Image (tube, rainbow, N blue to C red):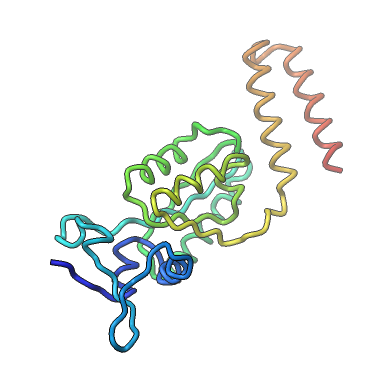
Amino acid sequence: MSKFVPITTAANALGVSAATLRRWEASGRLVPARTAGGQRRYDLAALRPELAHGAAAPRRTLAYARVSSQDQKGDLARQQLLLELYCASQGWTFEVIADLGSGMNYHKKGLKRLLDAILAGGVGRLVIVTQDRLLRFGAELVFAICQAKQVEVVIINQGEGATFEEELASDVLEIITVFSARLYGSRSHRNRKLIDGVRRAVQEAQC
């Protein structure tokens, strides 16, 4: 037997906001029934059959923070605090996943954990401070996966970070550092000379 619920209950069951359900209705993606008084009613069994029988918990909100290097740990702490304050202000039950690594590294532990949870269907919402905190390149692919899994993506600051160029340069420097260390050995004079040259070039490009 179908159970029709109001918009707030339906949003909680799907792990999205009521505003998202309204957008889905406007786009024709999910159109609810209406009561005689015009109030929205959603068929819970049709939305998520397992929830209609109480067999599964509502999907989680995951917040993701990332910086590229150890000397940016202060920024990582600020990101985490901002995410915690924002999610708490919305009344969401959430978990923050933090990563330390290049925005061009697709093998970070936190990112892998995040993607595994999304693909498993246990996530209803992803919250990030800016798009480049997720990945420097390829964030759109993750967003496409979120859309396919009905995961709402919330970007607190829609603009690019003020240090985009600086961090991109840091990412490039990190990759060259690792690559050259593998080629020449971490204590090689040639390796140190190469890294010093790249570092100077990066610093000059930022001026």
Quadrant of residue 191 within the rendered picture: top right
Quarter occupied by residue 72: top right
Residue found at the far bottom of this picture? 37
| For residue 74, side relative to residue 12 (left or right) | right
Quadrant in which the N terminus appears: bottom left
Which percent across, then down, holds residue 86?
49, 66
Question: Which of 71/177 is in front?
Answer: 177
Point 58% across, 46% down: residue: 73
Residue 77 position, x and y percent, is: 54, 53
Nearer to me, 134 or 141: 141
Residue drawn at x 78%, y 30% is 199
Which of these two is toward me, 71 or 157?
Answer: 157
**Is residue 183 placed above or below 60 in the rendered structure?**
above
Vertical side of 189 occupied by 9: above or below:
below
In the displayed structure, 18 sits above or below 67; it is below
Image position, residue 143 (x, y; %): 51, 48
Query: Which residue does the image show at 32% across and 43% down from the upper left?
Result: 120
Front in this rendered view, residue 24 or 171? 24
| Residue name at image x 45 percent, y 64 percent | 87
The correct choice, above or below, for 106 with respect to 79 in the image is above
Quadrant for the C terminus, please: top right
Numbered disc total: 0
